[in-house]
Image (spheres, grey):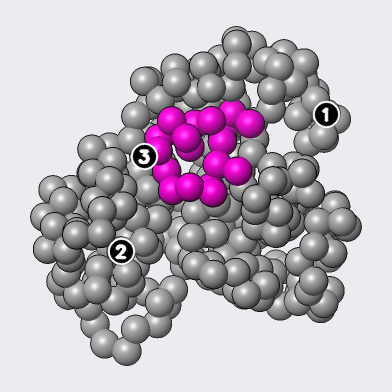
Amino acid sequence: MSPQQLAQEVENLFSLPDVAIRLNDLIDQPETTVHDLVEVVQLDAGISATVLRLANSAWYGLPSKVDTISRAITLIGQKALRDLVLSTSVITTFKGISSEFVDMRDFWDNSVTCGVVTRNLAKKCGIRESERMFLAGLLHKVGRLAFYASRPVQYRQVLQQQNSGEAAIIAAEVEVFGFNYAQLGAALLRAWRLPAALDEVVEYQLNPLHAPNFLKEAAIVHVAGDIAYHMAPDIKARFQLGEYNLTFLESAWETLDLDRSVLAETMQNSLIQSFELLEIINPRSAMIM
């Protein structure tokens, strides 16, 4: 079986909500108006509330209160709206995965943290549309959820390596399935018809220097994924920023052409921002127990 075949199977089982699909299609059409988007967003009360919470959050730091969906969309932008709706939709889509495989609260804590670090590093690197990079970081491990949801029996074989570290788990995925979570995640993003480039960045996150078109973007997600892995394993300890034994590829870091001092600043800012954002897009996960 190829990652494309399994992704199609997963897409049939775990399709995105209609609101997310319609918004994604509308935003790709140049004649779409804010009114068109408002009509779709208002079909889902949960998404409407989330959009307003985001527009009024420190994430955007707008000077006055935003009290209508149309104003929120105008201020945050159509692409940011799409990324927000896709983010919340993916979180909702994969609810119910057995705790045998993953603590979903920790999974989304890690994913949101990776998204925030990715966005912040993209800004430091001068990447155009750095906001879009948040979504790449958020979805960097969506392929693993696809494995858990669609092949739980086979994935138990992979989990036999969980005490040997992440590299051993990835190697076991390839041995059992013929491909890893990054390749499956990329195939799933293509099946969902998400914005171009996201699939390549996700697919090459483990080997960013092999990315054919978006090498720097893939390198950013590679570095951000490693930072998030070490920085946010437990939401209860979010604000205890300490020393981390980061293990990203030095060749990937060199691609970013950033001073090493940027790391500490990025990690500190990302801790606070990711907690704030998690409260917006997945409030139950942000509650410290």
Q: Does the magenta stretch include residue 193?
A: yes
What amino acid type is highlighted by mark number 3? Thr
Magenta span: 183-200
| x 19%, y 54%: residue | 41
Vertically, is 17 above or below 1? below
Report which quarter residue 82 is drawn in.
bottom left
**Distance in Å between CA atoms under marks 2 and 1:** 40 Å
How many neighbours does mark 2 have within 10 angstroms: few (below 14), some (14-19), or many (20 or more)?
many
The reply, left or right, for residue 107 in relation to residue 33 is: right
Tell us which disc is closer to us: 2 or 1: 2
- Please state which amino acid type lies under the numbered disc 2: Gln
Which mark is first along the chain, 1 or 2? 2
* Residue at the bottom extreme of this rendering: 63
Calculate the distance from the C-alpha at mark 3 to the C-alpha at mark 2.
21 Å
The residue labelled by disc 3 is: 92
Quadrant in which the N terminus appears:
top right
**Quadrant in the picture for residue 254:** bottom right
Q: Where is residue 175 in the image (x, y as percent from the top left)?
A: 77, 16
Left or right for 52, reference 280:
left
Task: Tell which circle, 1 or 3, labels the residue nearer the N-terminal end.
Answer: 3
- Residue position marked by numbered label 1 in the rendering: 168
Q: Is the magenta stretch mostly helix, strand or loop?
A: helix
